[in-house]
Amino acid sequence: MLNFLFSAWRAGLRSRSIQAVLVLGVLLMGVAYLAAQFTFRQAQTVAMDVGFSGLRISLILFALFWVQELFGREIERRSVMFALTYPLPRSQYVLGRYLGIVLLLGLSALLLGMLLWLVVLLTRGLFEQVFPIHLGTAYWLTVVGLWVDAAVVAAFAFWFTSLSTVPMLPMALGLAFAIGGKSLGAVIEYLSQADIGQAMLALKPLIDAIQWALPDLSRLDWRVSPMYALPMDTAAMGWSVVMAAAYAGVMVTLAVWSFRRRQFH
């Protein structure tokens, strides 16, 4: 499995298509800096907020591109047959590839997180911050949460890649999954309000059913703590990570099950 992990690591770093996403990430950090220039009192808070959004977008795109490059394209080109000639179970190939992508996402989160940290540090408004920011542990834990978020999206895309015969379908579904998972928490909170109409109340059973199939990825977004120097709810954060790890584990298990039964000709 380690051989597949290291080969995924090397191939991911050499991939040309990822360079475009890296440039996008740098541009999004630039957008965060420019956005902060339109406010006078909370410049660093605005820069951090926009930057975290850009960081998540970049990591999601990284995850989908790497799944396509390191797993989907090998299936499409049948080059996966060379890996399957080794006297090893197919599960080791799938796990090695997935863990390699997770490590690549971790490196990307670290580099972009350092860039955003520098952008926020260099951002200054005309007035002193009303709410101080926190660039210490809370900041880096938020980066970790976004990394876990991207790892869950990668696991979902991995499963669909092991099933799909259409190259771009897992990327499209993975992007829809990332958007839906992020929006689920806000939808549930809105439907929990008492003053919504009967038409919206009719959707509540459907949303309750969706919760069993779609994780609430908004629980992995902890940006409020570093943005306003608030204490972190470590218990809720821990359960969110457990939820994400369990869902990713189920997705990877399904990917292994599908890949074992897939026929390559």
Image (cartoon, rainbow, N blue to C red):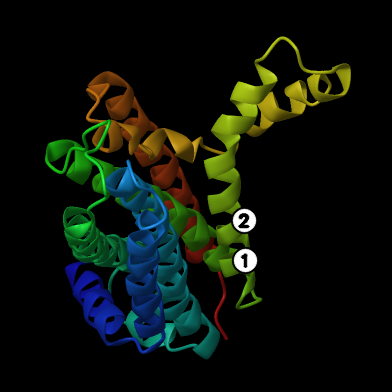
246 or 18: nearer the viewer: 18
What residue occupies the far top of the structure in this picture? 194
- Please state, as top left, top right, bottom left or bottom right, where the C terminus lies in the image: bottom right
Mark 2 lies on a secondary structure that is: helix
Is mark 1 in CB contact (under 8 Å) with mark 2? yes
Q: Amino acid at mark 2?
A: Ala
Residue 247 in the image: state x and y as whole percent: 44, 40
Q: Quadrant of residue 132?
A: top left
Q: CA distance from mark 1 to mark 2?
A: 6 Å
Q: Which residue is mark 2?
A: 176
Q: Position of residue 49 (x, y in %)?
A: 37, 47
Question: How far from the left and from the top, in percent, is residue 164?
Answer: 62, 69
Instruction: Look at 65% across and 24% down and name the residue there.
Output: 190
Task: Pick whichever, 43 or 93, lies toward us.
Answer: 43
> Horizontally, is 132 left or right of 243 in the view?
left
Badge 2: residue crowd in 10 Å (few <14, some 14–19, many ≥20): few
Which label sits on residue 257?
none
Depth check, front residue: 250 or 90: 250
* Residue 244 against residue 204 in the figure, above or below: below
Identify the image quadrant of residue 79.
bottom left
Give the residue drawn at x 23%, y 61%.
119
Residue 212 in sight from this viewpoint: no
In the current view of this chain or complex, which residue is farthest to the right?
Answer: 199
> Which quadrant is the N terminus positioned in?
bottom left
Is 204 positioned to the left or the right of 78 in the image? right
Q: Residue at x 33, y 65 (%)?
A: 29
Instruction: Say what amino acid the circle numbered 1 marks.
Output: Ala
In the rendered image of this protein, does residue 15 appear above or below residue 71? Answer: below
Query: On the image, numbered disc 1 is attached to which residue?
Result: 172
Q: As displayed, is residue 257 above or below residue 115?
A: above
Residue at 36% x, 31% y is 240
